[in-house]
Image (tube, rainbow, N blue to C red):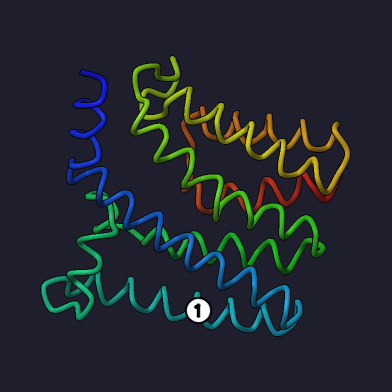
Amino acid sequence: MKILGLKAKFEDKKFQSEVYRKAFHIGLGSFLILAYFYLGKEIAIVLFTSLLFLAILSDVIRLRVYIQYPLKRIADTISRGYERTYLGAHTYFLSGLLFSSIFFHQIPFLIGAFVITFIDPIMSLAGMIFDQIKHPYNKNKSIIGSILGAVITFFILLNYTNILKASIIAIAVYIIDSVPLPYSDNLVYPVSISFLAEIL
């Protein structure tokens, strides 16, 4: 029965759309991280700014004339329903990484970028698969997804920093994922995690 339940979730259109959405974010985030790492901070900031400008321009066109929007099929696939009348998640994503790249040093930036690029998709997809236990104060999020993201964050950061810093950042990841946010997590994660890594 459990196997059938998992199969049904994998075949669910909502889950498949989330997979496409997170695959897009992983691809975009990986590209931006590599650009920052290999091209340097200054060139990366120019690149991030240019991409953010294009994203905002695309959002304006999409919100104004959605029926004639040239990327309508892609937007339908990788956007949640409510996102079709708001700024796209990728716009917040680029905004968060741009802010972090400007105001924080390399390692804190990379930690924040790593969390939003890889950990957030893991928590999101795991939360949809294992959604039996929800956070009491945020019914849209799964406790299992949050725990998994925090644990993976901890063990990966442990290879690059001390146990205290890895623990604090992992706890922050869990808390951010478990509470209702006033802004998109694509903006909150890179800024808050990079800031935390900067001051620790």
Residue 30, quarter of the rendered image: bottom right
Q: Residue furthest left?
A: 67
Q: Residue at x 69, y 74 (%)?
A: 36
Q: Residue at x 78, y 37 (%)?
A: 166
Residue 157, quarter of the rendered image: top right
Q: Secondary structure at mark 1?
A: helix
Q: Residue at x 41, y 29 (%)?
A: 141
Say which residue label 1 marks.
51
Which quadrant holds the C terminus?
Answer: top right
Classify residue 166 as left or right of residue 34.
right
Residue 19, placed above or below residue 4? below
Asked whether 191 or 141 is in front, the reply is 141
**How many numbered callouts?**
1
Classify residue 24 as left or right of residue 50.
left
Q: x, y percentage for residue 116?
A: 56, 52
Q: x, y percentage for residue 122?
A: 48, 42
Which quadrant holds the N terminus?
Answer: top left
Residue 72, placed above or below residue 193? below
Classify residue 97 as left or right of residue 129.
right
Asked whether 48 or 31 is in front, the reply is 31
- Residue type, label 1: Leu
Asked whether 139 or 63 is in front, the reply is 139
Q: x, y percentage for residue 41?
A: 75, 76
Mark 1: give few (<14), some (14-19) or many (20+) Cα within 10 Å: some
Q: Residue at x 60, y 30 (%)?
A: 174
Q: x, y percentage for residue 32?
A: 59, 71
Classify residue 50 as left or right of residue 12.
right
